[in-house]
Image (cartoon, grey):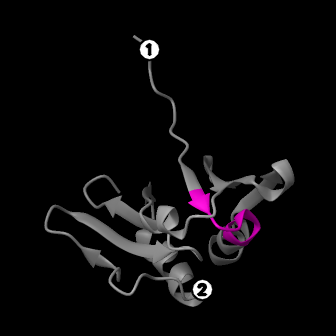
Amino acid sequence: MAKILATRPVLPSLDVTVSLKFWEEAFGCKTWLYDDGKFGGVQRDGFEFYYFFTDRKEVCEWTSCRLDVDDVDAFYKMAKAAGCVHPNGDIETKPWGYREFAVLDPYGVLATFGADLERT
């Protein structure tokens, strides 16, 4: 049977270079830039996603993604140190056993980091 091997979100940005720098500085990701700054990628631990340029801020603010991680508390410490935790996205354990927090990138894209406590 055919399998899906990975997903690679493509997120909007008003300035791709700034968005990539955010992930480098906050979470130690590797990044790359293409097409005169209109497209770029972020990679860490075998996971990757991409940014594309848009001039519409509302597109950024309406976009979100989730990142399942092995140590959500360690990523939370990185996010707190970088000052990017969403005002309503502090770390918490949900009743269904998922521990999560949310960050905002420089243009309002929401990224939720989390871990299923039963699987970690």
Q: Which residue is mark 1?
A: 2
Crowding at mark 1 (Cα within 10 Å: few <14, some 14-19, many 20+): few
Residue at image point 72% right, 72% down? 18
- Image position, residue 85 (x, y; %): 46, 82
Residue that extends furthest to the right in the rendered view of this protein: 36
Please identify the quadrant where the N terminus is shown. top left
Compute the Cα span from label 1 to label 2: 40 Å
Asked whether 80 falls inside the magenta stretch, the response is no
Who is closer to the viewer here, 81 or 89?
89
Residue 38 falls in image quadrant:
bottom right
Mark 2 residue element? helix
Who is closer to the viewer here, 109 or 90?
109
- Image position, residue 50 (x, y; %): 64, 51
Residue at image point 46% right, 69% down? 61
- Chain part drawn in magenta: 12-19
Tell me if 53 is positioned left or right of 72 in this view: right
Q: Which residue is mark 2?
A: 82
Q: How many marks?
A: 2
**Amino acid type, residue under disc 1 in the picture:** Ala
Tell me if 49 is positioned left or right of 61 in this view: right
Mark 1 residue element? loop
Q: Which mark is residue 119?
A: none
Residue at image point 47% right, 75% down? 103
- Image position, residue 52 (x, y; %): 66, 53
- Image position, residue 22 (x, y; %): 67, 74
Asked whether 14 falls inside the magenta stretch, the response is yes
Residue 116 seen from this side:
yes
Residue 44 seen from this side:
no
Please identify the quadrant where the C terminus is shown. bottom left
Crowding at mark 2 (Cα within 10 Å: few <14, some 14-19, many 20+): some
Who is closer to the viewer here, 75 or 16?
16
Residue at image point 63% right, 77% down? 26
